[in-house]
Amino acid sequence: MNIVLKTDRELALMREAAVILKSVQARLKQEIPKGLSLLELDHIAESVIRDAGAEPSFKGYQGFPATLCTMINSEVVHGIPDDRIPQSGDLLCIDCGVLWKGFHADAAFSVIVGGDKTNPERATFSRVVREALQKGCQAAKIGNHIGDIGAAIEKHIVSHGYSICKEYTGHGLGRALHEDPHVYNYGIPGKGQRLLRGMVLAIEPIVTMGNPQVKTLTDNWTVVTVDGQDACQWEHCGVVTESSLEIFV
C-alpha cells in the first residue's frame, strides 16, 4: 500500500479544487429543476470547470466519455449522461471530479427531482445514505482505522434495512483520482489501515434499497441493481483531523 500524505501546500490546492467542485454542484442544483437532459447537465458542469481554469477529473479517465457520472433510480455507479430528462420523483445521483493544479476533488450528491414530497420513500433512502456518510466522516480521526469508518457507515445503513454495495469503495485522493487506501463502506472497528495526519480520503457510501447484487450494462460502464430497486450515493472528500474529516466538498 502506497499512502501519500499531503503537505499543507498540497492541502491548500485541494481546498481550491473543492471550491470549484462546490460551484459545479451549486449550479447543477439550480439547473436540475429546469427539465434539462443528463447530457445538458454534463455540458454545463464541464463549462463551469473549464471556465474556472480546471479540468474534469472523470472525462477520459480509463476511457470514460463524460464530465459527470449520472445515475437515475436503479443505476448504481458510472452512469454515462445521455438525452434522458430526469422526471419528477426520480432519485438522481451525480458524481463529479475536478483537477486543479495537479490535484483532484471528488464528491457526489443525490436529489429527488421535483422535491422530496414527490417520492417520500426515495427521500428517506437518500437521507439515510447521507447520514451514513456523515457518520463515516465523523469516524475519520487521526489514530482511528479504516474499519472505524466502514463500521459507522454499515451500522447506520443496515439499521434502516438497506444494503451496502460492497463492490465499490471510497479511496485516497490527491495527484491521482484514486489513491490508497480503499475506504470500505463496511468493516470492523479498530481494523485496517490506521488514519494518519495529512491523509486525504473520499468517503462514499454506495447503497441499494434492496438486494446489493449488481450488473454492468452493455456500455461497459453503467452499473445497475439486479433486482431493479433503487441505489443511492453520497460522497465527501477531505483530510483526516484529530476530530473528524475536514470536509473539502
Image: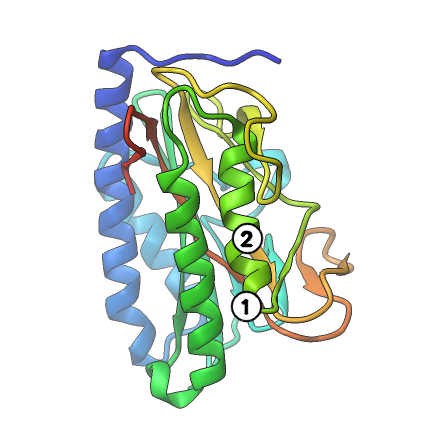
Q: Are marks 1 and 2 in contact (CB under 8 Å)?
A: no
Relative vertical location of residue 136 with respect to residue 189 in this rendering, above or below = below
Q: Do we see residue 14 in this rendering?
A: yes
- The residue lying toward the viewer, choosing from 247 and 74, is 247
The residue singled out by tag 2 in the image is 155
Relative vertical location of residue 6 with respect to residue 78 in this rendering, above or below = above
- The residue lying toward the viewer, choosing from 2 and 219, is 2
Q: Secondary structure at mark 2?
A: helix
Instruction: Decide if residue 6 is on the left or right side of residue 76.
Output: left
User: Residue visible at 33% across and 27% down?
Assistant: 239
Distance Cα–Cα, label 1 vs label 2:
9 Å
Q: In which quadrant of the rendered image does the N terminus lie?
A: top right
Relative vertical location of residue 59 with respect to residue 210 in this rendering, above or below = above
Q: Along the polypeptide, which appears first: circle 1 or circle 2?
A: 2
Count of residue discs: 2
Question: Given the image, on which type of amino acid does mark 1 rest?
Answer: His
Question: Would you call the spot at circle 2 few (<14 residues within 10 Å), some (14-19), or many (20 or more)?
Answer: some
User: Residue visible at 56% across and 24% down?
Assistant: 181
Name the quadrant containing residue 18.
top left
Name the quadrant containing residue 73.
bottom right
The residue singled out by tag 1 in the image is 160
Name the quadrant containing residue 101.
top left
User: Residue visible at 22% across and 50% down?
Assistant: 23
Q: Secondary structure at mark 1?
A: loop
Instruction: Decide if residue 102 is on the left or right side of residue 27.
Output: right
- Which label number is shown at residue 55? none
- The residue lying toward the viewer, choosing from 32 and 143, is 143
- The residue lying toward the viewer, choosing from 112 and 33, is 112
x then y, percent, for residue 14: 29, 27
